[in-house]
């Protein structure tokens, strides 16, 4: 079933799973840093390490083929400017709030703002990279680069574990292969999703086998975990990490295709449709909730992590709901007409949603 935005229900369901895993990782790490202790969320985060961000990039590249042939201006407006707008806006909000107001360091905030132009800032690096990857993919398409050649080169970059010290380059090298693979292999991924939806028992069997394999590769010799950092076992080996990431991302596709069969899980699909809203805005309420809970004497890491995670996910949605009700602040989650490129058909009062 395809909705008016040319997206499928299972894609939103997969994004719902993804945003949960991302917020969980940041909550567990921040609580672990403050308490010096680990909890069960750390083990969940460790299990998801091979595929947590790769599947987010894979999902983000799935529908690129539907717009890649648009004229440059229309394409750039939708797949480049769109993400850079939300990155710039929320980087400004995060930096001003955390460094200028809380940290009382306006000079440091100004420096961070300048660096944020060329080096993705904080958790918002993902939004920045979507714009950059969309731009590079369009250039490769214009150059008629063969999919197989790009995939081999992108896989080589990931396996090489590029460490230049430049965050933009390092993160691009680590994750572009998943974004581009989704664009190049989208029909096959959709067929896998449809197959899983129609073949429940075999799909569940594949998921069980994958879960066992993924756990073995993560928690094998070499695995280490402290309250902030996690090191995989064999799953960290070059090449094997790439394979586990792709298999894990496809496992999320299969899982989402099965979950859409359950009406009582529709809330997760809805959350996935608002995943960008949560992603750009969860960090600030997460930090505030964690600090308040610890100051109130709640120090059990599992409880603090769960409560912090609940606030981090719901607070952006509450803010989004308030903005819609009061009619002010829509620019936080919707791109206004002035933020579109001229001639793209968006220079009208209507706002372009964040997703």
Image: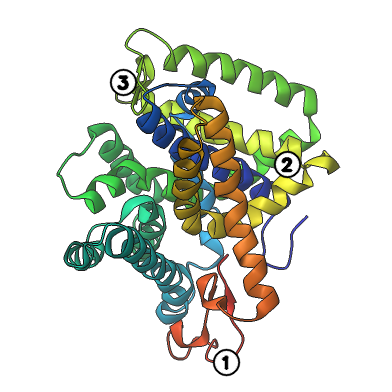
Q: Which mark sits nearer the N-terminus, 3 or 1? A: 3
Question: What's the mark number on residue 227?
Answer: none
Q: CA distance from mark 2 to mark 3?
A: 32 Å
CB atoms of marks 2 and 3 within 8 Å: no
Question: What's the mark number on residue 348?
Answer: 1
Quarter of the image for residue 115 reads bottom left
| Residue plotted at (54% across, 58% down) | 276
Quarter of the image for residue 91 reads bottom left
Say which of 201 and 38 sits in front: 38
| Residue plotted at (47% across, 24% down) | 42
Q: CA distance from mark 3 to mark 1?
A: 51 Å
Q: Position of residue 50 (x, y in %)?
A: 43, 29
Quadrant position of the N terminus in the picture: bottom right
Above or below 111: residue 228: above
Outermost residue toward the front? 296
Q: Position of residue 76 (x, y in %)?
A: 41, 74
Q: Which residue is mark 2?
A: 194
| Residue plotted at (40% across, 70% down) | 89
Q: Is residue 37 left or right of residue 254?
A: left
Q: Of helix, strand and loop, which one carries label 1?
A: loop
Q: Is there any visible trace of residue 140 in the rendered image?
A: no
Q: Which residue is mark 3?
A: 237
Q: Which mark sits nearer the N-terminus, 2 or 1? A: 2
Say which of 203 and 109 sits in front: 109
Q: Position of residue 139 (x, y in %)?
A: 33, 65
Q: Of helix, strand and loop, which one carries label 2?
A: helix
Say which of 116 and 32 sits in front: 32
CB atoms of marks 2 and 1 within 8 Å: no
């Amino acid at each position: 079933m395809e909705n008016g935005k040319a997206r499928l229900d299972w894609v939103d369901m997969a994004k719902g799973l993804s945003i949960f895993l991302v917020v969980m990782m940041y909550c567990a790490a921040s609580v672990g840093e403050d308490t010096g202790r680990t909890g069960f969320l750390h083990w969940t985060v460790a299990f998801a390490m091979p595929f947590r961000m790769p599947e987010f990039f894979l999902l983000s590249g799935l529908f690129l083929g539907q717009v890649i042939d648009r004229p440059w201006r229309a394409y750039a407006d939708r797949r480049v400017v769109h993400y850079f707008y939300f990155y710039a806006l929320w980087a400004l909000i995060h930096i001003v709030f955390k460094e200028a107001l809380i940290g009382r360091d306006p000079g440091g905030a100004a420096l961070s703002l300048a660096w944020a132009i060329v080096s993705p800032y904080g958790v918002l690096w993902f939004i920045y990279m979507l714009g950059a990857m969309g731009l590079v993919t369009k250039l490769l398409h214009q150059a008629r680069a063969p999919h197989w050649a790009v995939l081999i080169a992108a896989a080589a970059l990931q396996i090489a574990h590029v460490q230049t010290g430049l965050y933009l380059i390092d993160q691009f090298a680590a994750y572009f292969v998943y974004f581009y693979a989704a664009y190049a292999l989208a029909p096959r991924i959709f067929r896998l999703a449809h197959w899983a939806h129609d073949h429940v028992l075999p799909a569940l069997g594949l998921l069980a086998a994958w879960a066992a394999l993924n756990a073995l590769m993560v928690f094998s010799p070499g695995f280490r975990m402290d309250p902030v950092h996690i090191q995989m076992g064999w799953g960290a080996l070059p090449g094997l990490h790439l394979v586990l990431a792709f298999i894990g991302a496809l496992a999320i596709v299969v899982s989402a295709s099965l979950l859409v069969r359950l009406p009582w899980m529709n809330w997760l699909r809805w959350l996935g449709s608002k995943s960008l809203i949560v992603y750009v805005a969860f960090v600030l309420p997460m930090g505030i909730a964690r600090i308040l809970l610890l100051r109130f004497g709640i120090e059990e890491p599992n409880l603090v992590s769960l409560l912090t995670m609940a606030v981090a996910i719901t607070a952006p949605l509450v803010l989004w709901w308030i903005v819609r009700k009061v009619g002010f602040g829509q620019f936080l989650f919707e791109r206004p007409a002035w933020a579109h490129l001229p001639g793209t058909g968006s220079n009208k009062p209507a706002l372009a949603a964040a997703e």
